[in-house]
């Protein structure tokens, strides 16, 4: 009987800790970066060309333009991603777009709200892309889970940046 009480106490502790996470951790942030052996003008052009995105993010099935503004800021796209056999539709909005310097995107993917801020710098013909990402959720349960998946999110975005590097340098 004592063993059962101890096990239930441990389980209760972890369940309470899990639910408290959503109260105290409101957003999950992380960074990723990649160095590309090309000038920033080439890298930024390839990065900001909508049709290229399928070449470095293989899960993307389609990108549909909802509204595309000349300066890109305010442009909106509908993106369909295949996530382990399940199609997920998300909306991407361009929040900032400074030629050869910066691109900031806001994604609404069901319960995940994500902001990706890409900063481009060049030194000696070599470009560095720095991603600063922020994930939040409009669902309490998902907000409880995000901090525990930070490493997964970061690894996925790092993988995308590495794929982009391979695409640009080919």
Image: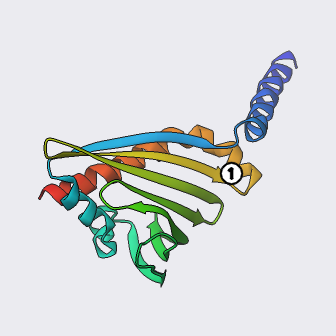
Quadrant for the C terminus in the image: bottom left
In the image shown, does 78 or 42 lie closer to the viewer? Answer: 42
**Which residue is located at x 49 percent, y 40 percent?**
30
Q: Position of residue 132 (x, y in %)?
A: 46, 45
| Residue to which mark 1 is pinned | 142
Q: Horizontal and vertical percent for residue 34?
A: 28, 44
Crowding at dot 1, Cα within 10 Å, few <14 / some 14-19 / many 20+, comes out as: some
Total labels drawn: 1
Task: Determine the residue located farthest toward the top in the rendered image.
Answer: 2
Question: Which residue is located at x 30 percent, y 76 percent?
Answer: 51
Given residues 24 and 124, the one toward you in this image is 124
Residue at position x 32%, y 70% in the image? 54
Q: Quadrant of residue 168?
A: bottom left
Q: Quadrant of residue 18?
A: top right
> Quick one: 35 or 23, which is closer to the camera?
35
Q: Residue at x 58, y 65 (%)?
A: 109
Residue 95 on image: x %, y %: 52, 63
The image quarter in which residue 169 lies = bottom left
Q: Percent position (x, y) of residue 74? A: 52, 72
| Scheme of image coloration | rainbow
Front residue of this view, candidates 137 and 65? 65
Left or right for 20, reference 152: right
Helix, strand or loop status at disc 1: helix
Quick one: quadrant of the N terminus? top right
């Amino acid at each position: 009987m004592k063993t059962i009480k101890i096990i239930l106490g441990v389980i209760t502790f972890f369940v309470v800790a899990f639910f408290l996470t959503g109260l105290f951790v409101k957003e999950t942030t992380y960074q990723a970066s990649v160095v590309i052996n090309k000038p920033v003008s080439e890298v930024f052009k390839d990065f900001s060309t909508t049709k290229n995105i399928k070449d470095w993010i293989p899960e993307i099935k389609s990108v549909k333009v909802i509204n595309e503004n000349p300066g890109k800021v305010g442009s909106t796209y509908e993106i369909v991603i295949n996530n382990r056999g399940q199609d997920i539709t998300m909306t991407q909005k361009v929040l900032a777009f400074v030629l050869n310097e910066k691109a900031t995107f806001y994604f609404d993917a069901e319960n995940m709200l994500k902001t990706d801020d890409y900063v481009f710098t060049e030194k000696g013909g070599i470009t560095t892309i720095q991603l600063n990402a922020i994930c939040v959720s409009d669902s309490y349960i998902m907000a409880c889970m995000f901090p525990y998946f930070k490493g997964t999110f970061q690894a996925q975005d790092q993988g995308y940046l590495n794929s982009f590097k391979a695409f640009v340098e080919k």
